[in-house]
Amino acid sequence: MRLVIIFTLITFFLALNSVLRFDNAYQPEQEGDRYLGWASALVLEGEYRGCPTIGYFMCEDGTQRAYRLPVYPMLLAGALTLVGTEYPLIPLRLLQAMGAALLTGVLVGLAYRLSGSIAALATGLFVVFTPNLYLNALFLYTELTFTLLLAVLLTRMVRVWAS
């Protein structure tokens, strides 16, 4: 259990460092601009479509309906409801950093449950030194959320299977 907490905290502080050192200007070619646009359309206008008619989001054509599953935009819309839509990038990136830390904790816990403390230590070291984890904390893409949900599902399956 200590390994889970240690690696979770290490990952959170490394992801937080990446978030705070990154240029926080909105850069639509680097951000998940479509996800952010869809989420802002949900918050500002109550519709799941390409882009709100107001705001600074550079998205696809606003008359077009969104064509992807709304799970990640709905998560972003919930966060936008809390932090506002004027300057949402830093709080959303902090949410991603927390997701990266939770992912590390879940993976280390899963490795511990399956193979013991040596495997948990190796998994924690591998995950902490993976730079893509911190890049996914910076950008608003679905990969981090998908991987976290998949790891939680696998942990739950192992727990049910073991009992």
Image (tube, grey):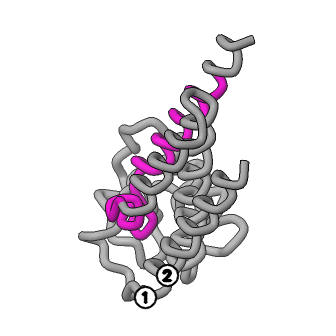
Q: Residues within 10 Å of mark 2 (few under 14, many from 20)?
A: few
Residue shown at the point (50%, 47%) measured from the top left: 145
Question: What residue is shown at x 49% (from left), y 85% (from top)?
Answer: 20
The boundaries of the magenta stretch are 130-156
Task: Judge the density around disc 1: few (<14), some (14-19), many (≥20) Cα neighbours within 10 Å.
Answer: few
Which of 155 and 42 lies nearest the eye of the viewer?
A: 155
Q: Residue at x 45, y 50 (%)?
A: 144
CB contact under 8 Å: marks 1 and 2: yes
Question: Which of the numbered marks, if any, corresponds to residue 154?
Answer: none
Is the magenta region chiefly helix, strand or loop? Answer: helix
Residue 71 rendering spot, x and y as whole percentages: 54, 41
Instruction: Give the percent coordinates (x, y) of residue 11.
Output: 53, 65
Q: Is residue 33 visible?
A: no
Element type where label 1 sits in the image: helix
Q: Amino acid at mark 2?
A: Asn
The residue tagged 1 is 21
Res 31 seen here:
yes
Q: Nearer the viewer, residue 110 or 116?
A: 116
Q: Position of residue 129 (x, y in %)?
A: 38, 63
Which residue shows up at 56% across the image and 45% down it? 108
Please tell me whether residue 136 belongs to the stretch shown in magenta.
yes
Element marked by disc 2: helix
Q: Which mark is residue 17?
A: 2
| Location of residue 27 in the rendering, given as x and y in whole percent from the top left corner | 31, 78
| Vertical comparison of 101 with 153: above or below | below
Residue 151, placed above or below residue 60: above
Q: Which amino acid lies under the numbered mark 1 shown in the image of this protein?
A: Arg
Q: Is residue 143 left or right of residue 43?
A: left
The C terminus sits in image quarter = top right
Residue 56 sits in quarter: bottom left
Q: Magenta stretch containing residue 144, yes or no?
A: yes
Q: Is residue 18 above or below residue 64?
A: below
